[in-house]
Image (spheres, helix red, strand yellow):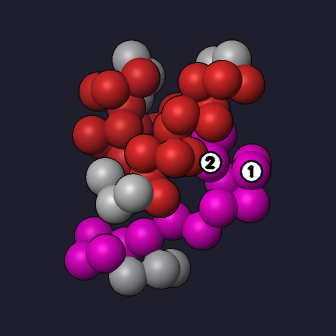
Amino acid sequence: MSEGQVDEAVRLYASGLSLARVGERVGFSARTIRTMILRRGIKTRGPHGRER
């Protein structure tokens, strides 16, 4: 992923979209999105929207 794509993924995730939905929007798997946002220091949410 380019830095711009990661920026967009972080923005979309922060807006409340799920990892899967963010992945659909930027063209990567949810797993890749999760890896990249974790590298940016963003905490992920659990399946019910709560921080882990």
12 over 49 or under it: above or below: above
> Which residue does the image show at 37% across and 31% down from the upper left?
23
Residue 21 is tagged as none
Instruction: Classify residue 1 as left or right of residue 48.
Output: right
Query: In x, y percent, where is residue 4?
Result: 66, 23
Disc 1 packing (10 Å; few <14; some 14–19; many ≥20): few
Comparing 23 with 10, the one in front is: 10
Query: In x, y percent, where is residue 52?
Result: 50, 79
Instruction: Classify residue 6 as left or right of residue 13.
Output: right
Distance from the alpha carbon under mark 2 to that under mark 1: 5 Å
Give the quadrant of residue 16.
Answer: bottom left
Residue 37 is tagged as 2
Query: In x, y percent, where is residue 32?
Result: 52, 33
Give the quadrant of residue 42.
Answer: bottom right
List the residue tagged with mark 1: 40
Q: Are marks 2 and 1 in contact (CB under 8 Å)?
A: yes
